Image: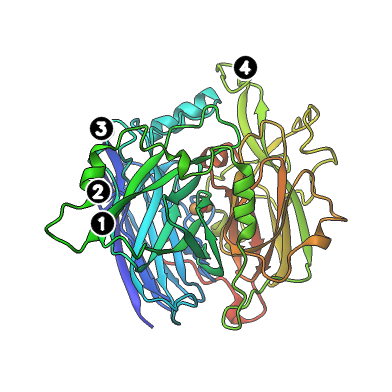
Amino acid sequence: STTRRFHFNVEWKKVTRLCHTKQLLTVNGQYPGPAVVVHEGDTVEIKVTNRIAHNTTIHWHGLRQYRSGWADGPAYITQCPIRSKQSYTYRFKVEDQRGTLLWHAHHSWQRASVYGAFIIYPRQPYPFSGSHIQSEIPIILGEWWNDDVDKVEKEMLKTGAGAKVSDAYTLNGLPGPLYPCSTKDTFTANVDAGKTYILRIINAALNNELFFAISNHTLTVVEVDAVYTKPVHTKAIMIAPGQTTTLLLRTNNHLSDGGEFLIAATPYVTSVFPFNNSTTVGFLRYNTNDKTKPANHLNNRRRLTKTTLSTRAVLPDMLDTKFATRFSDSIKSLGSDKYPCKVPTAIDKRVVTTISLNLQNCPENQTCSGYDGKRFFASMNNVSFIRPPISILESYYRKQSRGVFTLDFPEKPPSRFDFTGVNPVSENMNTEFGTKLFEVDFGARLEIVFQGTSFLNVENHPLHVHGHNFFVVGRGFGNFDEEKDPVRYNLVDPPERNTIAVPTGGWAAIRINADNPGVWFIHCHLEQHTSWGLAMGFIVKDGPLPSQTLLRPPRDLPKC
Ligand code: C2O
């Protein structure tokens, strides 16, 4: 097999957007960062050199890291951060995965600008071919802050309130003409009429689920989170932070004289205030065959004002939960002979956990502006996750867990109450802080039910599991019912993913074949919620065979 090598320098670079110039944290001075393009079966070696004064790590989001948890990347979970002037080489094999994923920094809020595409070409031809693919267009959705993001994060933790929202959404780092000063900074994809393109859509935004659409074009979903799906034709998609969606785009046959269409992304939120910071747009531009005629888009271009660019016609409404739910539920595993759906049809263990935002009294010498003079934090089963001082994986491997983590994550919610009732006053009053995990045997068939609560819950939570894909066997609104709901699970072709948007006031049930020994982080992929403690982890023990054990730690593994 081939070994592909990359070198990432984490470094500052002067970047201007919205007429604000600032030092932006980048990889190799690029924003978005360089794409990692590999083939199924490759060994990948990415040397990351820290050229800034702060710590850093990089996470290969959705990569299985089979037996190679040391290369997963979340700071203090599977490694100590890479310190200033130090390097660490992430080494792992890409096996039995194909499609679109992403990589991003996994330390503080660095992933605001440190991210890029991770693309795996398949061994076998695409199952959706039939049509010749003209070319591929990666589109990474992100956010831009005029302020230094480190400052935004610190401010949030100090005031206990929600973080300042970003100043723009971006397509491949470009805000587009609806934002001040950004007409030049507009993403454009050039296409020919009557061809099929692959669009690789990646949501690298920090704190928002997004709708994405192209005006007058139907999109066909063929893969999510690097797993093939049954084709779904749709006008728009909903994509949560950490999720990836591969689309086929068939361009119009009749536009060989050119034409221009909006590519747009806007937040999907279940409560408007204060999340709306507008819409990022770019253009899908048809090449014209007739070189003597001016292209249509040049004429169109002059008419593009804020009103004509109104994306209402293109995108679902910001609050369109119906659309979001229908879209998410339409995604199913391909489940073909070549790519069977390996959902566990029975389970060895079920963990039911609340995912919740909470309030806490303000520390003595502080003023909090979260809500009611209190500060926000978040929890799972009333445990708010604390990042330990050294890597959990290392302390587990060396059998020195004392003072680092405990294995008593509660496997049931603390008490039975109406999680999604309108007045859950009794809720979340006994939250503890801790680094609690649970442990399963190698090969265990695990079910986790994420139960949203209504207390302060105005947003969906995109839950991400490291080191494993999972099958979304059930989703619903209201309270999960252990008797009635499992009966209705989809155990035939549920979508296989690494990140699932759990609806506000609802729940999602996932199943995991826990076959990857190591320590694996589970958290909300809204960075703000992770900072508040909406996280936990689980340990998969070594299996009986040598090929089922965690590899030894690499020699250059960073020290805390
Ligand atoms: Cu994409 Cu733990 O993260």
Amino acid of disc 3: Cys
Q: Quadrant of residue 499?
A: bottom right
Q: Which of marks 2 and 1 is nearer the N terminus?
A: 1
Which mark identifies residue 373? Answer: 4
Q: Which of marks 3 and 1 is nearer the N terminus?
A: 3
Can see residue 403?
Answer: no
Residue 311 screen position, x and y as percent:
43, 40
Which mark identifies residue 181? Answer: 3
Pointer 2: what residue?
297
Amino acid of disc 2: His
Measure how far apart labels 3 and 1 are at the Cα level.
27 Å
Seen as rendered, the residue at the extreme right is 483
Q: Residues within 10 Å of mark 3 (few under 14, many from 20)?
A: some
Residue 521 screen position, x and y as percent:
58, 54
Q: Earlier in the sequence, mark 3 or mark 4?
A: 3
Which-is-in-front pick, marks 3 and 4?
Answer: 3
Q: Is mark 2 on a helix, strand or loop?
A: helix
Q: What element carries label 1?
A: strand
Residue 404 screen position, x and y as percent:
61, 48
Q: Which of marks 4 and 1 is nearer the N terminus?
A: 1
Q: Do the residues labelled 3 and 1 touch (CB within 8 Å)?
A: no
Amino acid of disc 1: Gly
307 is higher (above) or lower (below) than 346: above
Q: Between 535 and 295, which is closer to the camera in this rendering?
A: 295
